[in-house]
Amino acid sequence: MAKQKEEKAEPSKSELIREALKSHPNATAKEIVEHVKAKGVETNEGLVYQVKRTLDGNTDGPKKAKKAKSNGKPASDMVSMAAVQKVKALISEYGTEQVETIVKALK
């Protein structure tokens, strides 16, 4: 059987920060920390900024990097790694000059 939630006697740090932000909307993070500290709860500016961000609706976190754009060439113009390895093997077997001669002859 699941445990039943016990009601807390005192509000959480985040709840206190939200209340302070509602009562002092233009206050800085340091001022909010001091306001919450006056109620006997230790907190820090980082938590204030985090609560502010969630209140603003920005819970996505940092923006993710975009994918690289293509160079405009269709995929059929691209050379596969397997093809590059085959050409490299041909060059090591026959030499660069002979492979170039063969390619010119095929054109």
Image: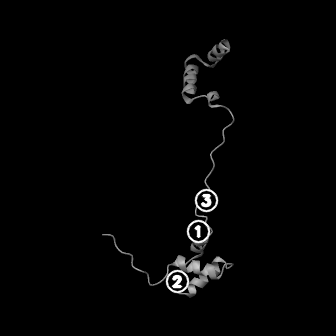
Query: At x 60% / y 84%, what residue is drawn?
Result: 35
Say which mark, if any, is on residue 41: 2
Residue 92 lies in what quarter of the image? top right
In depth, the one of 92 and 7 nearer the eye is: 7
Are there few (<14), some (14-19), or many (20+) residues within 10 Å of tag 3? few
Name the quarter where the C terminus is drawn. Answer: top right
Query: At x 62% / y 51%, what residue is drawn?
Result: 65
Say which mark, if any, is on residue 62: 3
Q: Is label 3 in a helix, a strand or a loop?
A: loop
Q: Is residue 35 above or below residue 100?
A: below
Q: Amino acid at mark 2?
A: Val
Q: Does label 3 or label 2 sit earlier along the sequence?
A: 2
Residue 95, position as x, y percentages in the image: 60, 18
Mark 1 or 3: the one toward you: 1
Question: CB atoms at circles 3 and 2 under 8 Å apart?
Answer: no
Residue bearing mark 1: 54
Q: Is label 2 in a helix, a strand or a loop?
A: loop
